[in-house]
Each structure stands twice: as structure tokens, then as C-alpha cells.
Amino acid sequence: MNRHTRNAAEPDPAAFPTRPYDLVKEFTIALVVVALLTVGLAAVFSSPDVKPVTLASWSRADGADFTATAVSELGGTSGTAEYGAPYNNTPGAAQKLGPVGLQSAAGVRIPMDTANEFVLRPLRDAPEPPAVTVALATWDAAPAARQRAWTVAYSDALAKAHGGTPAKGDYGPVPVLTARLLELARSGALDGQLQSQGKFYETDYTRPLLFLSDGSYLESLARAEHLGGDQWGMMNETGNYPGQAWLWLYTFWYQIEPFKSSGNADALIWGLMALLSLALMLVPFIPGVRSVPRWTRVHRLIWRTYYREQAVERSRRD
């Protein structure tokens, strides 16, 4: 049979109505519409592409806060120094779920002596002027009680100075040490020193992040974006897919009582989310709950076309 001969049973294409179709035109229109929608929605709903916060940017923007934080690290009174596990064995600093101490269960896995890690070691590893060398020797030779007295006195003086020059007092070598640390931070050297762990790839940001979180500068930036602990903001930072949006349910509990005012909120919310996750996984096995779809008949709404066709087919057979 000739391949150009049409079967008599086949419909004649000429019998159907036709219309011209410009594929290039349709494609161009679709492309322009989608591009305009993308730009418009991105302008309204997109997240800001915020530059990374570093020790260098912090020290340049707010040197007073950096210095005050460095003094607290040196004196062992910062948030990290008093946090407990996994950084240290500070007594009483533990998140608990009932009688189980979740925070201390795994022990100290990332030992963190803030005075040495954030202040003294970076100063010793960098080329130092003679005055800093003398200050380090003076600090090392002083008993712990004397060191605490120096840091407490200097911390109080900085607080009273409100960002200005503190009044004269017996601060020992603390002003010299923190001033030099501020210079290292502003030069960018401190970021590299805290991140350096002697490995080929230096991707551990634990120490710089802990130092940053102990100050108030990072929190002020977060609050400006409505990301504070008592705020409802959320940011999907560029490049960090899927961002924080999927954590909305987890962070929601921090905004309401009794979690909002509890010092044990982390453990309590972790336990609650574990319970909710378990309940979600067991939905097919929970009597009553597993029957909700059958009672609500939502599936018949979703698959209404199928059920309509089935009804027509049954009526024809009947």
C-alpha cells in the first residue's frame, strides 16, 4: 500500500477548523510576562542579599562593643564562657527535658577557653610590639583573682564611658591587650586566626561566630531585620536554600508562653517538635485521625473529574 494513501477510516484533517499559530510570538509573549512577574515578585517578596558579618566589619563599625566583648571573653563572663556544654563545664548551665539534662548529656565536645581562644592565643601568634609582649607576661604572671579584678574594673569603666575613653584606673594589662586585639580585628587578621585550625580547608566558623554572638552588634543587625528572638521576622538568605522558611513551626513556639519566658525553652521546644513529628509519622496508625480523609471526602473533591466519569459510566451500564 502506498505510504501516501490515507486509510478510509482515518479522519480528513481538512474537515477540522484550523487557525494560524505563531509559535515565536507566543514564546516571546510568555517570556516577557514571566520575566515581568519574576522581577515584580522579587522586588516585593525577595530577601535582602546581606553581606557576611565578620570580626573585621564588626570592629570597624562598633569598636566599643568589640572591646567590651573582648574584655568579657578575657574575664570569662561572656555568654560563651558561661554557656556550659558543649563548650565548658559551667555548673547549672544546662537545658533539661524533665530529669534528663540534654545539654550536658554529650559532654564537652568543643572545649572553649574564651580567654585563650579569642584573646591570648591570637595575640601570641601575631607579631607583637614590645608593650604587648610585656602585657602578656604580666597577665600570665598574675593569679586568677587578680585577673578577674582587672577585667571587672575595666568592663565597668567601659560601660560608664558609653563608647568613649574610660576613666583611669587599675586595669593591669587589659587595655593594652584589648587595644591590640582591636587592631588585629580591624586589619582582618583576627578572622583568619580564629578560623585557622591547621587544616587544608578552613571551613570551621565556630570560634568567629561564638565571638560575634557574645557582643551586641550582631544582635542589633538581626533586630534591624526583625530577626530577634522576640520578633517574628524570617529571612531566606541568598544562596542558603531552603533558608529559614521551613523552620517557621519550630521558631513559632519561641514567641508564645510558656516557652517565651523559659530559660529552658530550647529543650522544651525540641521535645515538643519531636512529639509532633512522631505524631505526624504515626497518622496512618492512629484510630480516628486516619479516618479524617474518609469523613471529609476531600479526595472526592480533588479527583472529582474521575468520580464524575465513573458515575456516567455506571449510569450507561445500568
Image: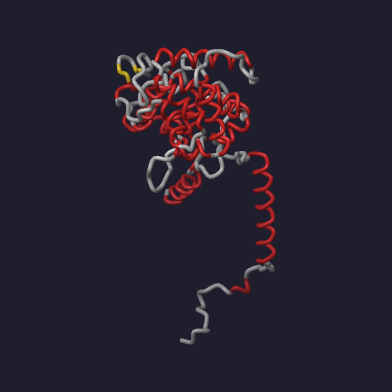
Q: Position of residue 47 (x, y in %)?
A: 61, 39
- Along the line of sight, which residue is nearer the eye, 227 or 144? 144
Residue 19 vertical position relative to residue 163 in the rendered view, above or below: below
Picture mark count: 0
Q: Position of residue 279 (x, y in %)?
A: 36, 27
In the image, taking residue 15 as reference, residue 124 lies left or right, namely left
- Which residue lies at the image location 47% right of the left edge and 30% below the top edge? 133
Q: Position of residue 95 (x, y in %)?
A: 38, 19
- Along the line of sight, which residue is nearer the eye, 110 or 248? 110
Q: How is the image coloured?
A: secondary structure
In the image, taking residue 151 as reference, residue 21 lies left or right, namely right
- Along the line of sight, which residue is nearer the eye, 231 or 318? 231
Quarter of the figure with residue 185: top right
Q: Position of residue 138 (x, y in %)?
A: 44, 22
In the image, taking residue 77 as reference, residue 43 lies left or right, namely right
Residue 108 vertical position relative to residue 241 in the rendered view, above or below: above
Residue 68 vertical position relative to residue 54 in the rendered view, above or below: above
- Which residue lies at the image location 35% right of the left edge and 26% below the top edge? 86
- Which residue lies at the image location 64% right of the left edge and 17% below the top edge? 162
Residue 65 vertical position relative to residue 29 in the rendered view, above or below: above
Residue sticking out furthest to the bottom: 2
In the image, taking residue 50 as reference, residue 241 lies left or right, namely left
